[in-house]
Amino acid sequence: MSFLCLDKVNCRRDGICMEVCPAGVITADAEGYPVVKDGAEAFCNKCGHCVAACATGALSHERLPMIDFLPNRKPRPETVAEVEPLMLGRRSVRAYKDKPVEHALLERILDVARRAPTAVNSQQVGWIVVEDPAKTRRLAELGMEWLRAAGHPRYVELWDKGREVFLRGAPHVAVAHAPADYTWGAADCAIALTYMELAAAAHGLGACWAGLLTRAAMAHAGVIEALELPQGRTVHGALMLGWPKYRYSLVPPRNAANVAWL
């Protein structure tokens, strides 16, 4: 069966694995058991949905070790009651405590972000996590050099008056990048950063999209060098991370959805 391994005793022959396969790689043999279509093996993108959707555990994938799969709990009403307030209450934090985030927690939210969906399961998103607060401060200084040269007087004025406006005093920054020639780099990085932002909020961390750093990482050699950005990669987004200095007691209003129902 090529890269698919089947336990026929537990297989229900219900066709679910075939239906959820995004590339249409799986078909049924004469007895109704799942098999890989002739010549279709190369089209498998290793998304793992065929294995994940098998309720009896009858299917496994030689390219995806079972130990790497996680249990997926069913949605419950209490889950909605937890997730919606988290999403609505998340704020763009621009004031941080002078306290670094422990390495294990940074790793944990990164582990959530790496599981974000990517186009065709390409998983081309790369990460640079600035863990050393001193290096984060240096990035902010380099970024301000770029802002001065680019002509942004408002930011320069605030910086010169002692207000850290580039990375807002965050102790850490997570930068998402992708191959420069990868069509879906911007979208995939944005989705992964959103996963990271929500994971950070779930753990009580503050986060804010670092738009100035993202722009500087596309234009300023000093910033690119400080990030040690691999050659051939483009930065598509970044998040400031740290313990929030303040808590918000209200969720600010936003415009009504601009939607057309068809």
Image: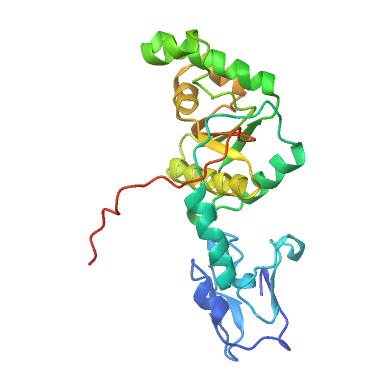
Q: Residue furthest front?
A: 249
Residue 255 appears left or right of 78: left
Q: Please tell me which residue is depicted at 71% across the width and 65% down the height of the picture.
A: 62
In the rendered image, is residue 168 in sight? yes
Q: How is the image coloured?
A: rainbow
In percent of width and height, residue 185 lies at: 47, 41
- Relative depth, front residue between 124 and 260: 260
Residue 57 appears left or right of 17: right
Q: Quadrant of residue 148?
A: top left
Residue 236 appears left or right of 63: left
In percent of width and height, residue 227 lies at: 60, 23
In percent of width and height, residue 165 lies at: 49, 20
- Relative depth, front residue between 188 and 164: 164
Relative height, residue 13 to residue 94 (above, below): below
Q: Residue furthest bottom?
A: 31
In the rendered image, is residue 118 in sight? no
- Relative depth, front residue between 12 and 38: 12
Relative height, residue 58 to residue 217 (above, below): below
Q: Quadrant of residue 7?
A: bottom right
Residue 8 appears left or right of 256: right
Q: Quadrant of residue 58?
A: bottom right
In percent of width and height, residue 156 lies at: 43, 11
Q: Please tell me which residue is depicted at 45% across the width and 30% down the height of the picture.
A: 211
User: Where, quadrant-wise, is the C terminus in this rendering?
Assistant: bottom left
Relative height, residue 1 to residue 241 (above, below): below
Q: Please tell me which residue is depicted at 65% across the width and 32% down the height of the picture.
A: 129
User: Where, quadrant-wise, is the N terminus in this rendering?
Assistant: bottom right
